[in-house]
Amino acid sequence: KLTHRGSYSPQARALARKLERHGCSQEFVGIVIEDVCKAAGVRVDRRMSRRTVGRCIGEGGVAAKIQLAHEIMDAPSLTASSDGTSHRNIEYQGRHVTLRVPNYVDDSPPIPRVRLLGVDSDTDHSSETQVKGLVSALTEISDLFNRCPSLRQDEIKMSLNTFFSKLKAMHGDHAADGKKNHRIVGEIKKELGLLDLGARQILATAPEELKLVVEAANDAKIADAGGQAAWDELSKEEQEQASSRTAAEIKTAFGLEVYEQMTDDEQRAFDMLLWGGCCMHKELNAAKGGSEGMKAWWKAHPDIQGPTLLANRDNAATLGDMTKINEETNSAQRRALNASEAGGVKTTLLAGALFNHANDKKGLQDTHVIYFQGIKPKGKSKRFPDTSTTRYGSNLDGAAELIVYLKAYITLLEQVRDKKEKGELNHLESNVYRALHDPATLTELCAMIIYALTVSWPYSIRVRGPETENVNLLDLGPLHHDLKAHIRRIIENPDIIFDNDLTPNPESCTLDGGPWHYPEAFAAVQKLAPSLPHLRDVTIAFFEGILPVWERFTAEFDEGGMIDGLSDEERLDAFMPTTNDANEGILGSMRWDKRTKLNASTHAFNARAMFRRNNTQAYMDANFGAEHHAYILHEHRRMDASGRVQAKAEAIRSHNATVAKEKADKRKATKTKKDKAAQAAAAVTLITDKTYLAKLTKGELEEQLSGHRLL
């Protein structure tokens, strides 16, 4: 039944959410329901409006937040992850929680699943702001859950410490702010944990002993205020704040006593907050190290012609025929050379910009697709790898694409050239065409393919391939040890690959000991190898460049480290996905949503995304009664009328104005200081007599130096 006592039933509201989820516009959901019911011979009293559909979606978001709080309460442990991006000059942060949850369909045991905590706009990208946003999101779901009609028999309320006490690890990319977030969250976890220990210890403390502690703390509180008279002059709010701090200090002191009496293993479990880095970010950074290794090899062999310079239009005009810095190089040419790049990675980036640009109005785009429809076999992608958006592994994929279809790409560019009125390629097309004829650039592309075949692609399948959603990052220490050992083995014995005229046994070359993941790519390298005399040396340089990067970005798995010493139970408690794809994906979805739904708020996006990704409908079907459906309906209306969107916008406006004023004031103060120093220096009578200068004091010499600097 669609309605009950004048309101749409929970079933009708669920149907509206389902239709919207499967692509039906909010405006047409009511029409679709009406038409389907009419076709089934069911009479519909009224048509669901667009606004009602929006409310149904918002209610689903409220339910998703209650669900996540409930799951946090029930879970024995959890881990958290995050990532940030900017969109239209506003910072956004995506957050997920990984914890063991039921499937809400049968009685199978809970298994680790990644749950979306939401995407929020931030005033800036600082670690402090990011952690503050995490605390704010947790506070919101705690409040919603605690006021909801009981979903648990024990009726225990959720607090911030509920989350932080169960938090065993944090997960993200390898940026500096992620490591700082980990440190700040660790401090919060320790602080809240000690408060909780202290509160429980206070309950077990004799009243007489507790009275003495409280009296001493109150005396200290009043003394800090300046005495009883000064205390009495404080406002009620100031007194309450001071008393709250004193109570927290008492709890912390009791908590520290309990903590210090713990065994080493108990303290280790209490403090444990692991950190794990996204495996695909490890691979992405390692590939950059390989590129640097190749650059270093060309630089160390100046007598060998390196990759052709692929300067942009302006720098190319400045440089002319110049490719290296020499005595005749002027400052403009020096800047142009330093800003210009060459080599395999630069070529794949330019090819991505030409053949598959992120802006669909630029580049060859469908000309490329149509051309390769007549060349590539059915089932092969006709688009160039997405290097223009820095997608994982796209540069290695791009290298394989260019080498496997080298002649086809050269022919395509020649067709593009000949089709033009003047018969000339534009600057981007010319750069790519020239790179595809350059032996040194082709050498780098082939070296990249060899790395992809032997290490990168087998590794990526292990950490990001099919059926890896249940793989725990903490169990991948052996994989990373094997990977580094494999790279060392290739460096020490490159004949594994290059022996017998580059006809190796793939099972001895690949990380997984299997066949080539792209046999056509290796065949293309074999075909080109005789014309690339430095392929072996450049490939070794690539591997030498990636090894230290892999060692640096897998430090969490080092022998003797925290992860290395975990028990099986601790590994399960701190389960982390192998990649940060969940956060990368949700931020990408948010950006797409912002582009296609110009007036939709982040809250509306969160409602749809959390409901869909967290399997909230199954949770509602298993746990909700009439009182819960009524609660989320009223809560959504309350939140919708709270002005939270406007409050967030005002917070960003206020922050921007404050930061702008602070920086302007700082610049003004710096200028004033410099002006005063310049005036003082200008008033100094300059002395050039060496004999007299030798008699001056240090301060007088500094005045002379300041005066001479103005000359």
Image: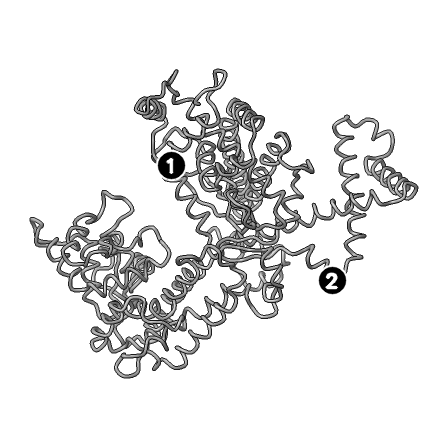
Q: Residue at x 28, y 55 (%)?
A: 385
Q: CA distance from mark 2 to mark 1?
A: 49 Å
Q: Residue furthest bottom?
A: 500
Residue 413 locus on image (x, y percent): 15, 57
Residue for badge 1: 593
**Kind of residue sitting beneath label 2:** Asp
Q: From the viewer's perspective, tell me whether residue 354 is left or right of residue 46.
A: left
Residue for badge 2: 264
Q: Residue at x 46, y 40 (%)?
A: 91
Residue 56 locus on image (x, y percent): 45, 27
Q: From the viewer's perspective, tell me whether residue 455 is left or right of residue 132.
A: left
* Residue 322, quarter of the rendered image: bottom left
* Residue 665, quarter of the rendered image: top right
Q: From the viewer's perspective, tell me whether residue 44 is left or right of residue 270.
A: left
- Residue 323 drawn above or below residue 251: below
Q: Residues within 10 Å of mark 2 (few under 14, many from 20)?
A: few
**Kind of residue sitting beneath label 1:** Asp
